[in-house]
């Protein structure tokens, strides 16, 4: 059986890593990279560090407005799917690359499987929410990471196409965490174990308004420990455009980190402050308190278990929330056991195999 994985953005490379490993010896696996992310630190380092095979196809679409970017991917993926004739196209998460691949395959009558299906923020301002809903409803196999995701799919009439496989980000995180245990990884320069925070901000709702971005940066700058701010290119670009200085107060500005370095930095920190989906969950799996700068989260389990706190409308609460006492310990495993990739390949073979 031939499976074509389509990826394009940073979180998708991380999810691809355990899938590529689990495919070995079980299916012919081709990889198409749309080129949505193209900087070395946003793309190449993930392939190198996580041992992912080089993509078989690279569209190099680059950045652009949503319609232009998604449309360029759609046209390019149509050619790739036609020429490679896969038995199934596997799409990951909720980016524009996900939606483009789902539409391209559906139009060519090639079955689509969606990994990380069923997540919902119920916030239609988020481009990711459109991408998820549209992808789930066009897919033939919905591979859900959590029980809550399964419930969302059932509520939308998609239960018969849904399988609970667990979260592949748990697979990769556990593997990297264990490999870090066997080596002595350096902390980022100037950071002392347990005495700094890790922060990332990249969502349009937080970066595009100068007043909101300024308020967030001001709160981070006022924190009681150094704040390692890992700046996505979007944050750097918009801060510069708005005339907002990111290097001030407690903030120590850093380029984005490669995955093992990010996990090392997060697990040795006193807390994470983010608007990323993946990092909220990684903080929980590492049992590091997280503060999420969003009105809601798809990863509701992290909040219910006390390890994640949301701050959005009242940004003056941000610093005090980050500095809150540590939550009660938990041994809950809502994101699976680290074996989701193997279950994913089994579900693909069972559903689409000859
Ligand atoms: C995308 C995903 C988001 C995911 C995030 C992870 C969509 C709609 N959003 O958001 O769900 O959480 O990736 O990082 O697909 N840029 C560079 N170099 C790069 C990539 C981007 O400079 O390698 C800059 C460009 O100015 C670009 C901007 O970042 O316009 C935004 O990139 P884009 O891929 O459009 O969206 P993200 O914000 O990264």
Image (cartoon, rainbow, N blue to C red):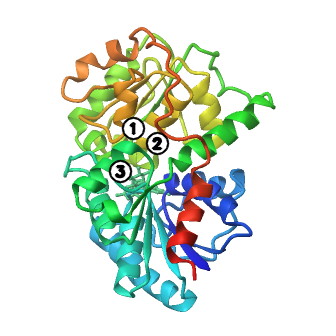
Residue 271 placement (x, y as % from top left): 48, 21
Q: Which image quarter has ligand 1? A: bottom left
Q: Residue at x 53, y 23 (%)?
A: 331
Q: Which residue is mark 2?
A: 278
Residue 279 in the image: state x and y as whole percent: 47, 37
Q: CA distance from mark 1 to mark 2?
A: 12 Å
Q: CA distance from mark 2 to mark 3?
A: 19 Å
- Location of the N terminus (image quadrant): bottom right
Identify the residue under disc 3: 150
Disc 1: CA contacts within 10 A as few (<14), some (14-19) or many (>=20): many
Looking at the rendered image, the disc whose residue lies closer to the viewer, 2 or 3, is 3
Q: Is residue 196 left or right of residue 188?
A: left
Tell me the SS state at disc 2.
helix
* Label 1 sits on residue: 201
Q: Earlier in the sequence, mark 2 or mark 3?
A: 3
Residue 43 seen in the current view: no
| Residue 290 or residue 199, whichever sits in front | 290
Picture quarter containing residue 175?
Answer: top right
The quarter holding residue 298 reads top left
Residue 3 horizontal/vertical position (percent): 57, 75
Q: Is residue 42 above or below residue 307?
A: below
Question: How dense is the environment of label 3, judged by Cα within 10 Å: few (below 14), some, or many (20 and up)?
Answer: many
């Amino acid at each position: 059986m031939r499976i074509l994985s389509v990826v394009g953005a940073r979180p998708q490379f991380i999810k691809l890593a355990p899938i590529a490993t689990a495919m070995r010896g079980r299916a012919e696996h081709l990889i198409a990279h749309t080129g949505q992310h193209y900087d070395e630190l946003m793309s190449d380092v993930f392939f190198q560090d996580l041992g992912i095979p080089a993509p078989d196809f690279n569209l190099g679409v680059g950045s652009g407005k949503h319609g232009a970017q998604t449309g360029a991917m759609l046209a390019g993926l149509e050619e790739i799917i036609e020429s490679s004739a896969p038995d199934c196209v596997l799409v990951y998460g909720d980016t524009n690359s996900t939606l483009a691949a789902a539409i391209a395959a559906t139009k060519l009558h090639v079955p689509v499987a969606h990994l990380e299906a069923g997540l919902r923020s119920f916030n239609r301002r988020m481009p990711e929410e459109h991408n998820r809903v549209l992808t789930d409803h066009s897919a033939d196999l919905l591979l859900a990471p959590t029980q809550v995701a399964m419930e969302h799919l059932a509520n939308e009439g998609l239960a018969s196409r849904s399988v609970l496989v667990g979260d592949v980000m748990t697979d990769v995180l556990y593997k990297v965490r264990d490999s870090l245990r066997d080596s002595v990884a350096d902390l980022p320069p100037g950071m002392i174990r347990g005495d700094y925070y890790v922060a990332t901000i990249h969502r349009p709702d937080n970066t595009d308004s100068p007043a909101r971005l300024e308020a967030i940066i001001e709160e981070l700058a006022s924190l009681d420990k150094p704040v390692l701010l890992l700046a996505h290119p979007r944050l750097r670009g918009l801060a510069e455009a708005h005339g907002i200085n990111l290097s001030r107060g407690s903030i120590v500005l850093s380029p984005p980190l490669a995955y093992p370095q990010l996990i090392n930095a997060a697990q040795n920190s006193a807390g994470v402050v983010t608007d990323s989906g993946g990092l909220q969950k990684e903080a929980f799996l590492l049992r590091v308190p997280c503060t999420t700068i969003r009105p809601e989260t798809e990863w509701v389990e992290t909040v219910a278990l006390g390890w994640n706190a949301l701050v959005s409308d009242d940004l003056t609460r941000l610093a005090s929330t980050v500095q809150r006492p540590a939550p009660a310990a938990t041994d809950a495993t809502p994101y699976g056991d680290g074996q989701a990739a193997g279950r994913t390949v089994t579900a693909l073979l069972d559903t689409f195999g000859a």
